[in-house]
Image: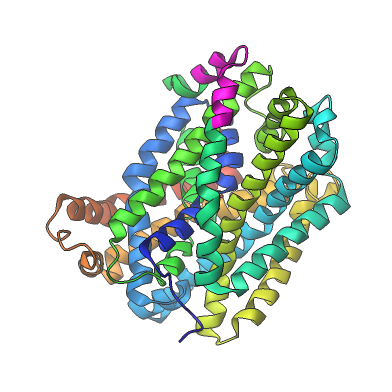
């Protein structure tokens, strides 16, 4: 049994799950998605979807894991029968694919940390051009993302208890402090208020179907939902923990970091006269400017510190992504943790190579003819996260609604929360999971698939 282990305390689980949630999704992806989708209108929809829809999904996912006490595949099988195990496998495959590209971007962040701290990145004149050169540098990318994978693997080998809990405890509070300090500084820059307006004053004409499903995909990605990461973490949680409260804390922490990241980035974007719509390059192009302006000594210190923390945030996320398939091999195949970790880390790293080479380094990977000429990184990220996570959430809530039953879920949630039964919360969560989530997430999933592969504009 002690192959598995468990979280030692409530705070241990919250930190680990919040560590999984807070990552590149908040600081790298959220700002560029917001920038591409009209600013404040996107933020508003994102917040609404997170609280109304994603929170119940998170509660449901943790409940499944805690009830079954197994990896994603085993949990679905145990509660739903053999066929439902495939839904767990689906999540495991998504996890592997998400990690493959996530690790590449984490490698960029790691590279920036090294280049700022130990080299002369802060003397560059044009960070857009620098980033363009940076992502095609084969050896830098290879080495930094390999390092990242190795560190992830070492921590996951140590197991949830020692590795994951400990890694989360110090980093999160530090990340908050540095974000807030940088925001205060960035708000004093010329034209910063234009960025604040863009970010906080919604223009409802900007809302399209695409805004809706992009916000949905972003919310799932950011909260680590839809693929069984929280089933897996939930399986390590004690029965006397209040799952509803823990999930609320995790959601609020995750939103807070994303919100602060936006509040930092957009004033910078506008004060530097940049476009908010530049996509995945955004934070890598905009952030070095603020560190440069601080002068060589302070800039190196704060900039290096920032990217180091970003790496830590990404690390607690890669840990959770790797833990999902590892738990599967440990629980279902009885393969020792160490062997599982090394085998999977190698596989994931190799699967990530095309994404790594897709930013201009190798033409074949950089422009996929069957995917509108987009890059492999875009393809993997859109298929396995933007599309697959909301679809996974749809299927998971459908599983609760039709197979496991909201009644059983309520029983599970009432453990550690004696007032749950009959409360408003219970009714709200059951209703959302039974009716709203399967239907709405199903519709979103179909729309996004149509749009990504055919183009919604071509359909109308
Ligand atoms: N939520 C993380 C982030 O925002 C990424 C992540 C970690 C994730 N584990 C996950 C996404 C599981 C989806 C599923 O950076």
Residue 200 shown left or right of residue 289 in the figure: left
User: Of helix, strand and loop, which mostly describes the magenta segment?
Assistant: helix
Question: What residue span does the magenta drawing correspond to?
Answer: 181-197
**Residue at image point 75% right, 42% down:** 112
Look at the image and tell me whether residue 287 can be seen.
yes
What coloring was used for the rendering?
rainbow
Residue 31 rendering spot, x and y as whole percentages: 57, 34
Q: Is residue 95 above or below residue 432?
A: below
Q: Viewer-proximal residue, 418 or 57?
A: 418
Residue 129 shown left or right of residue 193 in the figure: right
Residue 193 placement: quadrant: top right
Residue 159 rendering spot, x and y as whole percentages: 55, 73
Residue 309 shown left or right of residue 355 in the figure: left
Residue 151 rendering spot, x and y as whole percentages: 69, 63
Residue that sits furthest to the left in the current view: 422
Residue 416 magenta-drawn? no
Residue 105 rendering spot, x and y as whole percentages: 69, 49
Look at the image and tell me whether residue 37 can be seen.
no
**Residue at image point 62% right, 64% down:** 96
């Amino acid at each position: 049994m002690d192959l598995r282990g468990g979280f030692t305390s409530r705070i241990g689980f919250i930190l680990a799950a919040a560590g999984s949630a807070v990552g590149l999704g908040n600081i790298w992806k959220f700002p560029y998605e917001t920038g591409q989708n009209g600013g404040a209108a996107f933020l508003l929809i994102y917040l609404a979807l997170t609280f109304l829809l994603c929170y119940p999904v998170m509660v449901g996912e943790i409940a499944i894991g805690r009830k079954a006490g197994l990896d994603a595949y085993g949990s679905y099988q145990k509660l739903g029968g053999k066929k439902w195990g495939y839904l767990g496998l689906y999540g495991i495959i998504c996890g592997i694919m998400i990690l493959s590209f996530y690790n590449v971007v984490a490698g960029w962040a790691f590279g920036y940390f090294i280049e700022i701290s130990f080299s002369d990145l802060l003397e560059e004149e044009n960070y857009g051009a620098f980033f363009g050169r940076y992502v095609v540098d084969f050896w830098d990318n290879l080495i930094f993302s390999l390092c990242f994978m190795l560190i992830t693997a070492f921590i996951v080998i140590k197991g949830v208890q020692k590795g994951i809990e400990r890694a989360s405890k110090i980093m999160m509070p530090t990340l908050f402090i540095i974000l807030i300090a940088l925001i205060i500084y960035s708000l004093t820059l010329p034209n910063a208020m234009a960025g604040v307006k863009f970010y906080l004053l919604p223009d409802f004409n900007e809302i399209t179907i695409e805004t809706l499903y992009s916000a949905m995909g972003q919310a799932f990605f950011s909260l680590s939902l839809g693929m069984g990461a929280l089933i897996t973490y939930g399986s390590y949680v004690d029965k006397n923990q209040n799952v509803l409260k823990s999930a609320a804390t995790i959601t609020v922490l995750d939103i807070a970091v994303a919100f602060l990241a936006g509040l930092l980035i957009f004033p910078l974007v506008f004060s530097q006269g940049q476009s908010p719509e530049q996509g995945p390059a955004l934070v890598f192009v905009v952030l070095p400017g603020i560190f440069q302006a601080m002068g060589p000594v302070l800039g190196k210190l704060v900039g290096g510190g920032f990217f180091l923390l970003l790496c830590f945030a990404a690390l607690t996320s890669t840990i959770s992504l790797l833990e999902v398939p590892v738990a599967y091999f440990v629980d279902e195949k009885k393969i020792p943790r160490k062997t599982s970790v090394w085998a999977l880390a190698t596989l994931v790293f190799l699967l990530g190579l095309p994404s790594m080479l897709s930013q201009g380094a190798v033409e074949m990977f950089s422009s996929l003819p069957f995917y509108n000429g987009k890059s492999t990184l875009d393809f993997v990220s859109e298929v396995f996260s933007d599309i697959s996570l909301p679809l996974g959430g749809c299927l998971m809530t459908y599983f609760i609604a039709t197979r496991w039953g909201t009644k059983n879920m309520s029983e599970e949630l009432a453990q550690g929360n004696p007032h749950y039964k009959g409360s408003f919360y219970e009714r709200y969560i059951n209703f959302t999971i039974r009716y709203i989530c399967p239907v709405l997430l199903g519709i979103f999933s179909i729309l996004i698939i149509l749009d990504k592969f055919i183009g919604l504009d071509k359909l109308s």
